[in-house]
Image (spheres, helix red, strand yellow):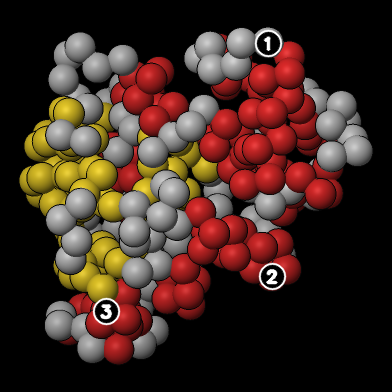
């Protein structure tokens, strides 16, 4: 594995009240490799993903133990600015969730509150660049003032990716980003993940093993809150070391 890690999680456990949902998970995330989290429903994939940008803070009964570093900085340190952290570690959700505002405004909102564009011409550039990177520019450039919610599901999801990109993140977390999309829209998002790889560290939670195999270079298999196996995607899918991984990828459960 590469040593150039963007994020390093060590012995991370997550509790919801007294219930332990994640048990001592250690994982590295880097720019060169897309990381996929797979595993049966309820195994803790989303819970662990949310620890990477402190989205668990929004759940009052959730508690995180262990350490998670972003470029060597402890993201759970008391001085950490969580708003800033979530710009650096952006998130795209299962259901596309554009704001009920224009396409332009959906993308411009983040850069504006983070002070990333000095005036209108600069903001126009940020919006265009973000929409281009998200593979949506050509489809929307003539209707930037239309509502983001009027786009198709797949376009809305790419708009949400543009919104994450607009604040210049280092990491993008995707929680089942295609589960509400049709196969064509799914293929577009997968293609986009390939294009974004290397520029951002990408982590994707997916129920779809074919998708994990297609888009990722590293796969982490979770089961009942533990990380059963973690390694090169090609190895996990062709030559898993653990019996449980083998059972899951051959469809014996899940
Ligand atoms: N807000 C919450 N409060 C209490 N328990 C929770 C909460 N969110 C998740 N859990 C529990 O934590 C465990 C892991 O759930 P999580 O959603 O992380 O799993 P998952 O692998 O992402 O599942 P799925 O694939 O179905 O989304 C489950 O037992 C779930 O019931």
Q: Earlier in the sequence, mark 3 or mark 1?
A: 1
Horizontal side of 142 relative to 203 (left or right) equals right
Residue 22 in view of the camera: no
Horizontal side of 24 relative to 127 (left or right) equals left
Q: Image quarter for residue 2? A: bottom left
Q: CA distance from mark 3 to mark 2?
A: 24 Å
Q: Which residue is mark 2?
A: 183
Question: Which numbered circle lies on residue 67?
Answer: none
- Neighbours of disc 1 within 10 Å: few (<14), some (14-19), many (20+): few
Q: Which residue is mark 3?
A: 236
Look at 63% across and 38% down and name the residue there.
130
Look at 39% across and 30% down and name the residue there.
88
Look at 40% across and 67% down and name the residue there.
216
Look at 17% across and 14% down and name the residue there.
78
- Above or below, comparing residue 169 to residue 199 in the picture: above
Q: Which residue is mark 1?
A: 119
The mark closer to the camera, 3 or 1, is 1
Which residue is farthest front? Answer: 121
Q: Earlier in the sequence, mark 3 or mark 2?
A: 2
- Above or below, comparing residue 153 to residue 14 in the picture: below
Nearest the eye: 223 or 227: 227
- Neighbours of disc 3 within 10 Å: few (<14), some (14-19), many (20+): many
């Amino acid at each position: 594995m590469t040593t150039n890690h963007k994020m390093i999680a060590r012995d991370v456990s997550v509790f919801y009240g007294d219930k332990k949902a994640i048990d001592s998970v250690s994982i590295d995330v880097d720019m060169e490799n897309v990381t996929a989290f797979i595993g049966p429903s309820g195994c803790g994939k989303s819970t662990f993903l949310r620890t990477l940008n402190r989205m668990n803070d929004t759940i009052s009964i959730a508690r995180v133990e262990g350490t998670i570093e972003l470029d060597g900085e402890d993201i759970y340190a008391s001085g950490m600015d969580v708003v800033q952290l979530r710009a650096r570690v952006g998130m795209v959700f299962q259901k596309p969730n554009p704001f009920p505002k224009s396409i332009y405004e959906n993308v411009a909102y983040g850069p504006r509150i983070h002070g990333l564009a000095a005036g209108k011409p600069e903001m126009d550039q940020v919006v265009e660049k973000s929409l281009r990177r998200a593979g949506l520019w050509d489809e929307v450039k003539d209707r930037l003032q239309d509502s983001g919610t009027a786009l198709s599901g797949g376009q809305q999801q790419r708009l949400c990716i543009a919104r994450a990109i607009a604040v210049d993140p280092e990491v993008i977390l995707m929680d089942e980003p295609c589960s509400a999309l049709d196969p064509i829209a799914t293929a577009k998002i997968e293609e986009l993940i390939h294009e974004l790889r290397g520029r951002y560290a990408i982590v994707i939670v997916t129920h779809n093993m074919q998708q994990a195999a297609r888009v990722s270079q590293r796969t982490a298999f979770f089961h009942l809150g533990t990380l059963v196996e973690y390694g090169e995607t090609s190895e996990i899918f062709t030559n898993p070391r653990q019996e449980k991984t083998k059972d899951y990828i051959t469809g014996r459960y899940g």
